[in-house]
Image (spheres, helix red, strand yellow):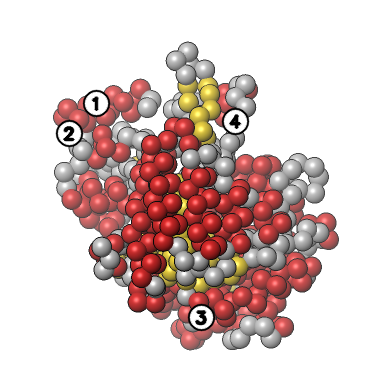
Amino acid sequence: MNRQFRNILIMGLGMGITFNSCTSNNTGGQQSTASADSVDSLQTYVNNRLPIYENVKLTADMQSLSESERKMIPLLIQAAQIMDELFWKQAYPQKDSLLNTIKDDKAREFFTMNYGPWDRLNGDKPFINGIGPKPEGAGFYPIGMTKEELEKSDVKDKKGQYSVIRRNASGKLESIPYHVIYKDELQKASGLLKQAAELAEDAGLKKYLNLRAEALTSSNYTASDYAWMDMKNNGIDIIIGPIENYEDKLFSARSSFESYVLIKDKQWSQRLAKYVTMLPELQKGLPVEEKYKAEKPGTDSDLNAYDIVYYAGDCNAGSKTIAVNLPNDEDIQQKKGTRRSQLKNAMRAKFDKILVPIANELIDKEQQQYIKFDAFFSNVMFHEVAHGLGIKSTVNGKGYVRAALQEQNSWLEEGKADILGLYMVTSLLKKGELQGDIKDYYTTFMAGILRSVRFGAASAHGKANMQCFNFFKEKGAFERTSNGTYKVNFEKFATAMNDLSKVILTLQGNGDKTAVEKVEKDYAIIPAELQSDLNRLGEKGIPVDIVFEQGIDVLGLK
């Protein structure tokens, strides 16, 4: 904890904390402004911000599960809840100290939803006076440590995925593995997974749960990742452990704890299975020079649909994930591929409660007929599949793209998945492998951008969407009409799609971090005109995202 924050916290504990002045018009993805000397209470800020979330009860058809599977679900949820505790330690270790000073129930709820005192859907704006900007290194690194200090140190695990950096008694930097620093919590979670494994009827699920239990206590996740990829016939699933590196904005290296508890929709999953086999052919057709598409994507991948019954940790912070593409390990991706998990019930909730109202307000009236759930589902699905396309290693010896681009990698990779997902949709429609009208997919994609940019340009997904919006606008792929709605130019939309695909794949293949930084500066921004349109959505009371009622009680399990 830095000295400034420690002093503020001590004063807050003794005298009550003063809360930041801010104004809000119930929109996300914007930097609220107010005069420096105006002070609103925390309750005022929270009352303005809570309405941007739509409450959704997270349920599924539990009757489709066997008795053993129903007994497993509570154990998996308990393990997931431990991941939630660990993510707090990574995102905001001072949780209890600050939370104890907040007496208002709604304010406590808002603090908890954001996993700390920074509004994740408002550009990480601090809503408690004196907290200051969110540290780029979150809780992964010592307060005050610079990138240069770590890079010049003799720490062997400088950019380790499963460790934290701390100062020892003499002030020297050192690396501590997750399974050491979080030993008690991870052993407890490991035990719960082993209990669930004893109930598992599917051999593949049993193997995966046991290996994942061992991985939590060793920080060696490779074997369990392979077992997860080999698992084919399971009816339930759990994604659990340190997975994504979005929270580490200093190096984009260290992974955050999270968990999803899932029930497979086997009927929908069967419909999706064929698309993975088409990846090599789609890779060859990418609109970029040959050297940037020479890699062969893995085809031992799964494409499945699930109902999610529990979110925990990183995936529950800020905007809620509605599709997952894992594992992130590049070696596994090239050898085995990935599993793309579509979270159908959460996706449906966002479509009905958010995307359709946005389209009714901001999409040209004549094109609103093209807003379709099947198109939304496919656009999201192929975004995840598209993570497997393109390039993982640079073409000039700089190693993996992720290592070369460091903190610039995540947002550009999300942008790649957005645009190559649309490329896949376009290609598959032409081949007759996907049903529907291209106008449905393009118009729904446009509405999807307007939905996602409300998360703000601080997140990886927000930056990716802003890059796409500004690039497509520059290319004339859409126009803003005189009545403030957006109208897609379908021909130019396809051209812009190919042009942006080439730009992103080239940036990744070259591993040129400086060039990516310039693109971020020029394109990953919210123009004033767009912000004005997003403000209209807030004034109409259209939510920005969803928040869940979830847990064993909601599912009717004990």
Residue at image x 38%, y 37%?
184
Earlier residue among tags 4 and 1: 1
User: Eyeballing the image, is 141 above or below 516?
Assistant: above
Asked if the residues shown at circle 2 and circle 3 are in contact, with their CB atoms under 8 angstroms apart, the answer is no
Write down the residue under mark 1: 10
Residue 189 image label: none
**Gap in angstroms between the C-alphas marked 2 and 1:** 10 Å
Kindly identify which numbered label has been placed on residue 267: 3
Amino acid type, callout 1: Ile
Q: Give the class, few, some or many, for how many residues have Cα within 10 Å of label 2's Cα (few <14, many ≥20).
A: few
Q: Nearer the viewer, mark 3 or mark 1?
A: 3
Q: Nearer the viewer, mark 2 or mark 3?
A: 3
With respect to residue 404, does 197 lie above or below?
Answer: below
Secondary structure beneath label 1: helix
The quarter holding residue 381 reads bottom right
The residue beneath circle 4 is 158
Q: Earlier along the polypeptide chain: callout 2 or callout 1?
A: 1
Where residue 84 sits in the image (x, y, percent)? 37, 48
Which numbered disc, 3 or 1, marks the residue that appears first in the sequence? 1
The residue drawn where x is 55% and y is 62% is 204
